[in-house]
């Protein structure tokens, strides 16, 4: 029986990337190899226009599901590769394949990539569709809304025939977009923001501010569990845990309660800025969403942002909480995020935090204590963990 023996991986947005394209494809190829390593028996190879997965005897369903999680893939088709490109042979193969499909109407769609092929697309379409009509009883052609769309791609090395196409995750392959220093809190939003960045090809390092004994060690286990889920997209993630207690206490000793959160976040961004520079990350990222809490009004963001000249990417900035939650559920971080925990932002929460803080007031409070040594101390006591889903990732350069 003739079967669909390959998966054809399409690049989408990547195809527009000119001379970077081949580097992007190489990165995607590497990411696909890693994503599919749990399946033995597959053969994976790369060409300039597509990547192919040869299934041999492996069930295609779980392979496609896993590939749908890999960023940089626009679409996936289950294809039959036919090396004998003679039209008589193609007609027979197409007939065999269409007989295995359910449906009453069909359409043949031909893409002639090899411009030297002796027949043009229209001729191939007519030859194949005519042959199918002649040799089947219950099938008719519907060019607008067919039950079965039989696609034929004519290439130099072979002809590919397919009728099942699946959506990919889109975006860019992880690793082509550089690296962001991501602020990870353990809530719902920041893991979603991390995922959205990775989907655009950006690798992450994470920074977490811990305030023991006010925050518990359980938070770190939670972060590790979250990052293990994100390991699906990035095999190895560096987590910097910054001791924040002394800074936080100093802020509470010298600042009006209503300004504590603003001040705390200014210190967080100062530390993130320094760590990002030390780790060669050109941007900082966070899970902030406009208007969600007092510290995320536009005025608060402006005053907090003032401590750094680095770009801050906030992938969730304009998302509604419900959409953020939907994404968290989809990627599998939601159940971990909702485990109860205390974040350094939630201890000593002021009764009425400023929604429109003033920069002069922040500067005035900051003059009242020498925070610089505290920042230095926090950075030098930072603990680093690697969250990784595999042994081999230890060699990976991040
Ligand atoms: P999340 O649901 O991700 O916790 P949130 O809605 O609770 O976000 P905030 O607590 O105001 O919002 O935090 C906003 C963003 O600031 C977080 O998404 C995260 O990027 C960063 N952040 C907050 N607390 C910490 C922390 N302890 N360590 C690192 N980053 C933090
Ligand atoms: Mg939170």
Image: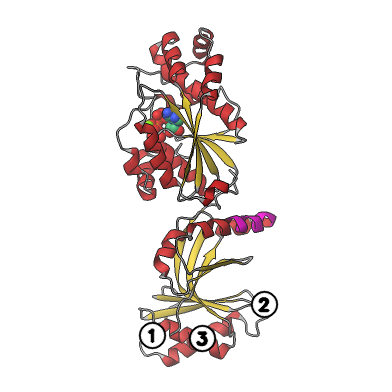
Image: 125 above or below 37? below
Q: Which mark is residue 115?
A: 2
Instruction: Mark 1 vs mark 2: give the one in front.
Output: 2
Would you call the spot at circle 2 few (<14 residues within 10 Å), some (14-19), or many (20 or more)? few
Which residue is pictured at 30% across the width and 37% down the height? 339
Query: How far from the left and from the top, in percent, is residue 164?
Result: 44, 71
Question: What residue do we see at 45% from left, 22% from top?
Answer: 244
Q: Residue furthest bottom?
A: 134
Residue in view at x 41 percent, y 73 percent = 145
Rendering colour mode: secondary structure
Name the residue that disc number 3 marks.
Answer: 128
Residue 4 belongs to the span the image colors magenta: no
How far apart are labels 1 and 2 at the CA level?
30 Å
- The rendered magenta stretch, by its main secondary structure, is classed as helix
- Residue range in magenta is 19-27
- Residue to which mark 1 is pinned: 139
Q: Is residue 26 magenta?
A: yes
Query: Mark 1–mark 2 contact, CB under 8 Å?
Result: no
């Amino acid at each position: 029986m003739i079967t669909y023996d390959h998966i054809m991986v399409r690049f989408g947005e990547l195809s527009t990337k000119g001379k970077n394209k081949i580097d992007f494809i190489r990165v995607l190829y590497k990411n696909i190899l890693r994503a599919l390593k749990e399946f033995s028996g597959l053969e994976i190879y790369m060409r300039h226009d597509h990547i192919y997965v040869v299934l041999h005897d492996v069930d295609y369903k779980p392979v496609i599901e896993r590939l749908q999680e890999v960023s940089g893939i626009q679409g996936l088709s289950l294809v039959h590769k036919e090396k004998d490109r003679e039209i008589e042979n193609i007609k027979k193969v197409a007939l065999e394949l269409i007989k295995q499909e359910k449906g009453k109407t069909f359409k043949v769609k031909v893409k002639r990539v090899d411009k030297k092929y002796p027949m043009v697309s229209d001729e191939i379409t007519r030859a194949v569709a005519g042959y199918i009509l002649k040799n089947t009883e219950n099938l008719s052609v519907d060019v607008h809304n067919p039950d079965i769309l039989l696609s034929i791609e004519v290439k130099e090395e072979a002809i590919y025939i397919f009728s099942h196409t699946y959506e990919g995750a889109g975006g860019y392959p992880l690793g082509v977009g550089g690296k962001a220093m991501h602020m990870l809190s353990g809530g719902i939003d920041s893991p979603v923001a991390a995922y959205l960045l990775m989907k655009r090809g950006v690798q992450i390092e994470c920074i977490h501010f811990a305030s023991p004994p006010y925050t518990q060690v359980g938070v770190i286990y939670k972060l590790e569990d979250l990052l293990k889920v994100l390991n699906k997209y990035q095999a190895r993630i560096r987590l910097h845990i910054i001791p924040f207690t002394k800074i936080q206490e100093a802020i509470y000793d010298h600042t009006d309660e209503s300004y504590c959160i603003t001040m705390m976040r200014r210190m967080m961004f100062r530390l993130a800025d320094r760590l990002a520079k030390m780790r060669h990350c050109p941007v900082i990222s966070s899970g902030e969403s406009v208007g969600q809490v007092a510290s995320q009004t536009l005025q608060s963001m402006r005053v907090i942002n003032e401590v750094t000249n680095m770009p801050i990417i906030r992938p969730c900035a304009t998302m509604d909480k419900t959409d953020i939650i939907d994404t968290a559920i989809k990627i599998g971080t939601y159940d971990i995020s909702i485990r109860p925990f205390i974040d350094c932002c939630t201890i000593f929460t002021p009764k009425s935090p400023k929604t429109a803080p003033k920069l002069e007031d922040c500067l005035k409070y900051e003059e009242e204590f020498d925070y610089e040594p505290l920042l230095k101390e926090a950075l030098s006591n930072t603990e680093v963990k690697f969250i990784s889903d595999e042994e081999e990732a230890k060699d990976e350069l991040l």
